Image (cartoon, rainbow, N blue to C red):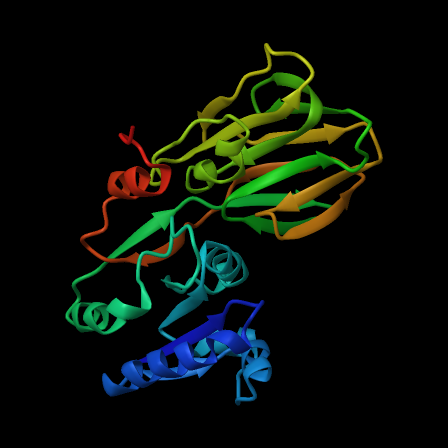
Amino acid sequence: MKAGFILKPKNTIEIKDEFLKIKEIFEKYNIEVLLDAISARALGLRGVDFEDLCKSVDFIVALGGDGTLISVTRRAYKFDKPVFGINLGNLGFLTDINPDNVEEFLKKFLKGEYRIDERMVIEIVYNEKKLYAFNDVVISKDIISSMINIQIDTNESFLNTYRGDGLIISTPTGSTAYNLSAGGPVVYPLTESFIITPICPHSLTQRPLVIPSNFVLEAKVKENFSKLILDGQEIYDLNDKITIKKAQKPAKLIHRIERNYFDVLREKLHWGER
């Protein structure tokens, strides 16, 4: 069995010792560890090109925080390999395995005592190129003092023209990210829907909207100072319409069987505390 590791891109040197400890645990259970070439160079180790790594491993490990897991899941999406995160970050909505319980998890993993969650992915067609987002697609203005107008049409009809600082189109997984901070709803991550949330809308009647995932959305922006942002990580100048739809296949996340989403919400969002 082979595992491909991708490390948090920033402060990589600081997590070298942690990686080497975890690598030793994996090898103790006869799991060969391959390290992504970019991560390896930062650590002064030997690595494997990302695409070659994804093709040759049985699963992928993101060592970092939620942002690392999101980036790895998006980049590795086309290879259809399951991903799990070992949490070295702060939030941990998606990365539910900590360095201290890696060995305990691996014992269960090798006995098949784990689960794979299938999470909806967004496919974006822009300038005849297919892009993917795991959390959200954001259309944002690029000038502080200006407002943008975003027209959204569906495969059924015209939906709305949003006027304000921008628009978030989120997956249920991404509902607890930028969507939540912009006043959007929390949506159970294994449902399949689009969450459309305006950013600082010009009118208070512009409210968040949840629609089925079988809708195909087309977004048009009149202004030429707007940006297309995928998962808060990939940024493109937006100068044409984009088409947004549910991708044909889901992303696969490996989790502990014991993981309970509502426990995560209570812990991370401090629900029920006075």
| Residue in the foreground of this view, choosing between 63 and 56 | 63
Q: Residue furthest front?
A: 274
**Above or below, 56 relative to 82:** below
Q: Quadrant of residue 172?
A: top left
In the rendered image of this protein, does residue 24 appear above or below residue 51?
below
Residue 227: percent from left, percent from top: 74, 41
For the image, the number of numbered tags is 0
Residue under the point 23% across and 72% down: 106
| On screen, residue 251 above or below 98 | above
Query: Where is residue 272 shown, x and y percent of the image?
Result: 26, 30
The spot of residue 14 in percent (x, y) is 51, 75
Query: Relative to 142, is 162 above or below?
Result: above
Residue drawn at the location 54% of the way across and 61% of the way down: 75
Q: Confirm whether residue 214 shows in the render.
A: no
Q: Residue 82 at what x, y percent from top left?
A: 37, 62
Q: Is residue 151 left or right of residue 240?
A: left
> Residue placed at 64% from the left, 23% from the top?
200
Residue 6 appears in the picture as rendered: yes
Q: Is residue 151 left or right of residue 265?
A: right
Q: Nearer the viewer, residue 150 or 262?
A: 262
In the rendered image, the quadrant that contains the C terminus is top left
Figure quadrant of the N terminus? bottom left
